[in-house]
Image (spheres, rainbow, N blue to C red):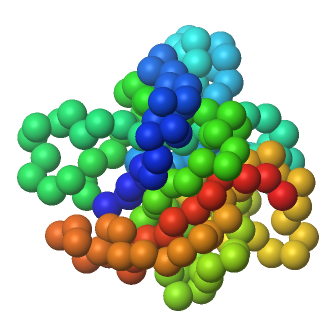
Amino acid sequence: MSMFKFQNYSAIKNAQDNPRVRATALTKNGYVFGVKDNYNVGGGVIYSEAAVPFNNAAAAKAGDVWVAINIIDKPELMNTSDYVINAGEYIRAFNLSKLHGEKVEITSDIVINAYNEVNVGDILIPANAYDNGSEPMKWKKATGNDTEYSVCLEVTAKTTFGVFTIDGGVGGGFECKITSN
């Protein structure tokens, strides 16, 4: 089950939530993306604000970085790990670019790298379509060349956050500090 939550009240109090953003692809809580205005999804349909996966590293470095944190509002779901935001549905998008220094907790299933490959002190950066074509809105572990990101997550602790979920697909979680590199 994909989860992303603010650890401190100060982050919750200061976070900017944009409820007008619409998904352009299957999105889960914790997925990271950019927001584009007047986005043409085809067939004459234009979203005034759209969550768009980053096409490449330059796009992920350049603008504001947003994350999906929706309330699970689909009572027909029997398992919360089945929760997804489908294309066209609204996302509670939070702008991480304005929250440097705040701490968050994330589950390892929203990171491309395996749980045991990520260590305390590692930096997680927004992935893009080049990194993971099937799920380009996840996070990934930065390598030596991955610098100049306006938003990244510094892993401060490995936790058990998310391992209680029924699907068993989460190896653990990470406590992270929002920063830049």
Q: Give 43 or 118, whichever is nearer the viewer.
A: 118
Coordinates of residue 96 in the picture (x, y in percent) = 63, 40
| Residue displayed at 64% across by 39% down | 99
Q: Residue 72 vs residue 133: left or right?
A: left
| Residue displayed at 33% across by 45% down | 84
Coordinates of residue 23 in the picture (x, y in percent) = 48, 32
Q: Which quarter of the picture shows residue 122?
A: bottom right
Q: Quadrant of the C terminus?
A: bottom right
Q: Residue 90 vs residue 41: left or right?
A: left
Q: How many marks?
A: 0
Q: Residue 33 vs residue 29: left or right?
A: right
| Residue displayed at 45% across by 52% down | 7
Q: Compared to 25, does 160 lie above or below? A: below
Q: Is residue 76 visible?
A: yes
Coordinates of residue 80 in the picture (x, y in percent) = 21, 53
Q: Give 54 or 161, whichever is nearer the viewer.
A: 161
Q: Is residue 136 visible?
A: no
Q: Residue 172 vs residue 100: left or right?
A: left
* The furthest residue to the bottom: 116
| Residue displayed at 15% across by 56% down | 79
Coordinates of residue 25 in the picture (x, y in percent) = 49, 40
Q: Which quarter of the picture shows residue 1?
A: bottom left
Q: Give 13 or 164, whichever is nearer the viewer.
A: 13
Q: Which quarter of the picture shows residue 153?
A: bottom right
